[in-house]
Amino acid sequence: MTPADHTGDTSTGAKLLTAARDVIPGGVNSATRLVGAPYVLTEAAGAYVTDADGRRYLDYHAAFGAILLGHNAPEVDDAVRRAVGGIDLVGWGVTEPEIELARLVVETIPSAEQMISAMSGSEAVAQAVRLARAVTDRPLILKFQGGFHGWQDAVARNVISTPERAYGRDPLSRGILDDAIESTVIAEFNDLDSVRELYERYPERIAAVILEPIPHNVGALVPETEFLQGLRTITAEQGSLLIFDEVITGFRHALGGYQQICGIRPDLTTFGKAMGNGYPIAGLAGPRALMERFSSAGGDVLLAGTFNGNAVSSAAGIATITYLRDHPDFYERTHALGDRMRTGLGAIVSELGIPAVPAGFGGVFALYFTEGPIRGYRDLLRDNDEAYVAFHRRMTDRGFLMLPLALKRNHISAAHTEEDVDRTLEAAREVLRSVRDDGLLG
């Protein structure tokens, strides 16, 4: 049964998906949600979700990492309940929750002096790209093969590219103007020479370098310190901005994001996903001199959005960041669980003689089906995508929710326990043995 074909499935979830397809294109509101059973999820609590047929899953997908504290964390949900019934959507001036949220962000993200709110990471990146072009008066954005920065035209290219399309022209969608595609150039992660070559090819035309400090949209490519330091040096010398897209790494790996860990201060930082523990909230932060180019401060870069800074999203952001600030053991615990998972997976693949490499950072983990070392996307072109998807699919079928798409990562939240991880590893041993024995390793 393919994700798009549930013919013959008489489950409640399959019937609901059929009904959804009458009124929603494909039955889902985001293409990566159409990945097969479970078709419909109806409940979520802590580290678990339940489908329409009553089956319970240990959730490692976590809404692409948006769930940081666990589903329906009471600290966040209680704050949202208090916000409902107070100030709602007025579209006038500023509200106290907006001020408090901005204060917390400025206090926690090392490079932040001011911030603006948005509703999604895609919106935050769109604002960052526009601001960078305005500040530098240059047209081009440099991104890395495998990096994902949202659905907007400016950066919607070259994510999980096939070998014949990698590093070349690989837009994510039809309908993007050629000018938009050609205005973004592609380098290789952890390869400063590829960055320098593009600066030589396009002198004084690159407005900004944007990157996920850890490219989690292709699992987890861990950056080399010299690479990040080199990007900071090159962009400063070339008059470009350095943008850290911390939509996934932000608040998940450290309170101040990955920039707190690596000690590199970007010019602009985007964040979202985890900062509201599942509520729609994102943002962009940077130094005052850059942020005051926005029209809200009398500058020449448009800032608009009726829902920006709304009370409910702000309350979720405040509660989540406050929890993380007041519970620094969150990071020690989730990092330890991540290490436990990666170490366990490494032992299993070694025991079974499977060519696979556990990867990740903190509470994020992936299992690449290839030999190491893995530094950049070129190394991921060797990955056995069939085995990768089969591992996630079979784990999900056993009750461990892992997105069955190539190179997608898994997330450990505050609600996961050592027992959860150990139970996952027990299932993984049986699943990996079946992947091997079914001849999926090539």
Image (cartoon, rainbow, N blue to C red):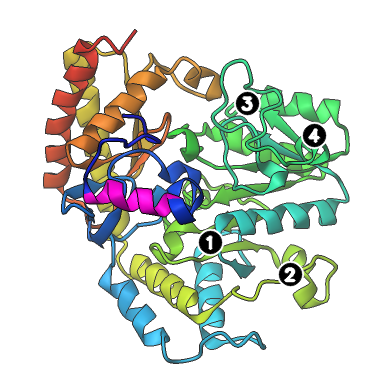
One can see residue 368 in this view: no
Q: Which residue in the structure is indicated by mark 3?
A: 188
Please tell me whether mark 3 or mark 2 is closer to you in this view. Answer: 2
Q: Give the Cα separation between the discs numbered 3 and 2.
A: 32 Å
Q: Nearer the viewer, residue 73 or 209?
A: 73
Which amino acid type corresponds to the residue marked 4 in the rendered image?
Glu
Say which label, 4 or 3, has the lower sequence index. Answer: 4
Say which label, 2 or 1, has the lower sequence index. Answer: 1
Q: Give the Cα separation between the discs numbered 2 and 4.
A: 25 Å
Say which label, 3 or 2, has the lower sequence index. Answer: 3
Q: Which residue in the structure is indicated by mark 2?
A: 303
Q: Which residues are magenta?
A: 12-21
Q: Residue at x 23, y 13 (%)?
A: 436
404 relative position to 198: left or right: left
Which amino acid type corresponds to the residue marked 1 in the rendered image?
Ile
Query: Where is residue 165, by image quadrant?
Result: top right
Magenta stretch contains residue 265: no
Q: Which mark is residue 182?
A: 4
Tell me where residue 117 appears, x and y as whole percent.
59, 69
Magenta stretch contains residue 18: yes
Q: Residues within 10 Å of mark 4 (few under 14, many from 20)?
A: some
Q: Which residue in the structure is indicated by mark 1?
A: 109
Q: Give yes or no for contact between labels 2 and 1 (Cβ–Cβ under 8 Å).
A: no
Q: Give the Cα separation between the discs numbered 4 and 1.
A: 32 Å
